[in-house]
């Protein structure tokens, strides 16, 4: 399976986790062929243990929109999805899956007074032993339909009963410039919710909107390509390269 376009980004602390994990793998493989004494086996096991701890501690630092009011709803739906996993799907074995939420994409573009948005829910799977700097990505298995006006509660729509893997997403730490862009997420999404017409090209809000969405798409190219098919006019306006 080829790497998809774009990168899923983590903050710099992840480098230490991958260093520990890589050292552990090298020690274990060398020990298998008799190059390293038994004491290094203990070191290898410790490396894996520390790497897993580091991995779990970094889930919250992944660039993700998980502060939404509908998170409890998604937690409940995710449990139903996970219980539907089939053994043939879990390849390679040992993949640890979790769900993620895309930014809001406008249902209509050019925008109208309806202000309806779709958040796409997808899954990301990690297996540090077989895939160190990447993650398995699923197609959207659900979406949240939300109104920018807040007049109606968010509605969950299930798109698939079980996960369907669509590719592998590369990963790397984000730089300072990218971190600053992600810090403007709330401002960009709020601005999007106010639009009833296509904004002026010289509008600072329009520039922020493009900057935020294009950065997210570059870092999450696999899932972004799936969403692009459903929101072609909006992606055409974004003009991401």
Image (spheres, rainbow, N blue to C red):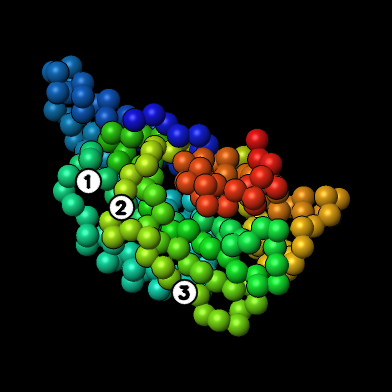
Q: Quadrant of the N terminus?
A: top left
Q: Earlier in the sequence, mark 1 or mark 3?
A: 1
Residue located 21% across and 21% down the image? 30
Q: Position of residue 174 (x, y in %)?
A: 57, 41
Look at mark 3 in the image and give the residue it sits on.
155
Mark 1 surroundings within 10 Å by alpha-carbon count, few (fewer than 14), some (14 through 19), many (20 or more): few
Residue to which mark 1 is pinned: 89
Query: Can residue 214 be seen at all in this image of the molecule?
Result: yes
- Secondary element type, mark 2: loop
Q: Earlier in the sequence, mark 2 or mark 3?
A: 3
Q: CA distance from mark 2 to mark 3?
A: 20 Å
Q: Residue 92 is drawn in which quadrant? A: top left
In this picture, residue 107 sits left or right of residue 101: right
Q: Is there a contact, CB below 8 Å, between mark 1 and mark 3?
A: no
Which corner quadrant holds the C terminus? top right
Residue at the far bottom in the pictured view: 151
Taking depth in this image into account, of 198 and 54 the one nearest to the observer is: 198
Q: Which mark is residue 163?
A: 2
> Do we see residue 10 in this rendering?
no
> Total of numbered circles in the picture?
3
Where residue 38 appears, x then y in whole percent?
13, 28
Q: Are marks 1 and 2 in contact (CB under 8 Å)?
A: yes
Question: Mark on residue 226?
Answer: none
CA distance separating discs 1 and 3: 28 Å
Q: Is residue 126 left or right of residue 15?
A: left
Label 2 with label 3: CB-CB less than 8 Å: no
The quadrant where residue 176 appears: top right
* Residue located 41% across and 74% down the image: 72
Location of residue 55 in the rendering, given as x and y in whole percent from the top left corner: 37, 47
207 with respect to 115 (left or right) = right
Measuring 45% from the left and 63% from the top, which residue is drawn there?
143
């Amino acid at each position: 399976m080829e790497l998809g376009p774009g990168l899923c980004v983590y903050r710099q602390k992840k480098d230490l986790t991958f260093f520990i994990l890589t050292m552990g793998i090298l020690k274990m493989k060398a020990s298998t062929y008799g190059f390293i004494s038994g004491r290094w086996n203990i070191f290898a096991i410790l490396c894996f243990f520390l790497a897993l701890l580091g991995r779990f501690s970094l889930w919250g630092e992944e660039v993700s929109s998980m502060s939404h009011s509908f998170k409890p709803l998604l937690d409940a739906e995710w449990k139903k999805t996970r219980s539907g996993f089939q053994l043939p799907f879990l390849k390679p074995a040992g993949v640890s899956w979790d769900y993620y939420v895309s930014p809001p994409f406008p249902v209509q573009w050019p925008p109208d007074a309806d202000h309806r948005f779709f958040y796409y829910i997808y899954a990301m799977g990690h297996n540090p032993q077989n895939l160190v700097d990447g993650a398995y990505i699923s197609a959207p298995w659900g979406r949240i339909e939300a109104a920018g006006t807040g007049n109606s509660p968010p509605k969950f729509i299930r798109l698939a009963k079980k996960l369907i893997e669509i590719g592998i997403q590369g990963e790397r730490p984000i730089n300072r410039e990218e971190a600053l862009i992600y810090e403007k997420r709330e401002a960009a999404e709020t601005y999007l919710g106010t639009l009833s017409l296509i904004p002026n090209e010289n509008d600072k809000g329009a520039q922020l909107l493009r900057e935020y969405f294009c950065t997210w798409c570059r870092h999450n190219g696999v899932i972004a390509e799936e969403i692009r098919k459903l929101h072609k006019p909006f992606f055409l306006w974004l003009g991401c390269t």
